[in-house]
Amino acid sequence: METASTSNNKKPNSKSAKLSRDVQTRLGQQLRAMYDEVVGQGVPDRFTELLNQLDSDENKDRH
Amino acid sequence: MAMDESVRKAVLAAVPSLRAFAISLCGSVDRADDLVQETLLRALANIDSFQPGTNMSAWLFTILRNHFRSEYRKRRREVEDGEGRYAETLKSQPEQYGQVEFKEFRQALTQLPADQREALVLVGASGFSYEEAANICGCAVGTIKSRVNRARTRLAELLDIDGTSEFGPDETTRAVLAGHDHP
């Protein structure tokens, strides 16, 4: 005879249950892969140009 | 005052990670790059308030995060829109992410409340400690920890990972893509 909570109940309470280490690891890997994909694109030219522009503006202001 | 070479280097070094953080916040590459540009302009205009020897990257992240939050609140007020609707907008523009590979994950990420999303990304991807993330978000360390936990739980639900099944059909797709990555 089975109790109310059956033996094949593998998700006791998904809302409050602590995520397994395995799930956390996989989420972390996905997140970092997505993030690192952007980081790997380096510095787009517009930002180097922006800093050059600001630098030369400041120099002009000073002289 | 001309830009100090060390400041310039530190700012440029932070740009790739700032972009990744910005994309995760706003979901659009174009908007994210504008956000980063506005952040750099603000930072350099206030460079005197940066304390040398402290973490330049964390300082820039704080500026970007606060700027995004105030813009976001403004937009929300303007359209009297909820977070759900905003997430829907992002979901309808998946092509902006550019990467088919992470589409499912990114879409799940956009469905998280903004405070959970930023906490998860700062700690789980940007590599900040809980303490640093708390400083960036202007909240308690315990708050960051609980946001990260809630974000993970919600993501696992959205992506239907419960520790017993694989990531779903995309797992196969990814395996296939990975197998043909090299020419």
Image (spheres, helix red, strand yellow):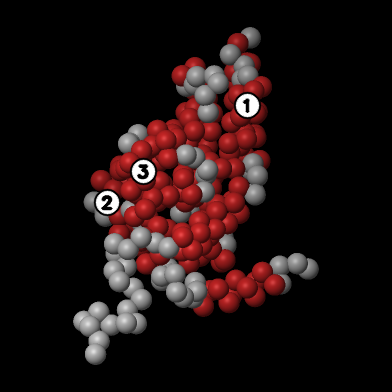
Q: Please tell me how crowded label 2 is: few (under 14), some (14-19), or many (20+) other residues with Cα within 10 Å.
A: few
**Chain letter for the residue marked with disc 3 in the picture:** B
Where is residue B61 shown, x and y percent of the image? 47, 36
Name the residue nearer the viewer: B88 or B121: B121
Give me the disc on residue B8. 1
**Chain letter for the residue marked with disc 1 in the picture:** B
Where is residue A62 shown, x and y percent of the image? 60, 11
Q: Residue at x 53, y 28 (%)?
A: B55
Amino acid found under the numbered disc labelled 3:
Ile
Q: Please tell me how crowded label 1 is: few (under 14), some (14-19), or many (20+) other residues with Cα within 10 Å.
A: some
Amino acid found under the numbered disc labelled 1:
Arg
In the rendered view, does A9 fall on the left or right side of B61? left
Give me the disc on residue B144. 3
| Element type at mark 3 | helix
- Outermost residue on the bottom side: it is A1
In the rendered view, does B109 fall on the left or right side of B18? left
Closest to the camera, between mark 3 and mark 1, is 3
> Is there any visible trace of residue B90 in the rendered image?
no
> Upstream in the sequence, badge 2 or badge 3?
2
- Outermost residue on the left side: it is A4
Closest to the camera, between mark 1 and mark 2, is 1
Q: Residue at x 63, y 26 (%)?
A: B8
Where is residue B155 shown, x and y percent of the image? 40, 62
Give me the disc on residue B79. 2
The answer for how far apart the CA atoms under marks 2 and 3 are is 29 Å
Q: Residue at x 47, y 39 (%)?
A: B129
- In the rendered view, would you say B86 is above or below A9? above
Q: Residue at x 58, y 38 (%)?
A: B15
The N terminus of chain B - image quarter: top right
In the rendered view, does B56 fall on the left or right side of A55? left
> Upstream in the sequence, badge 1 or badge 2?
1
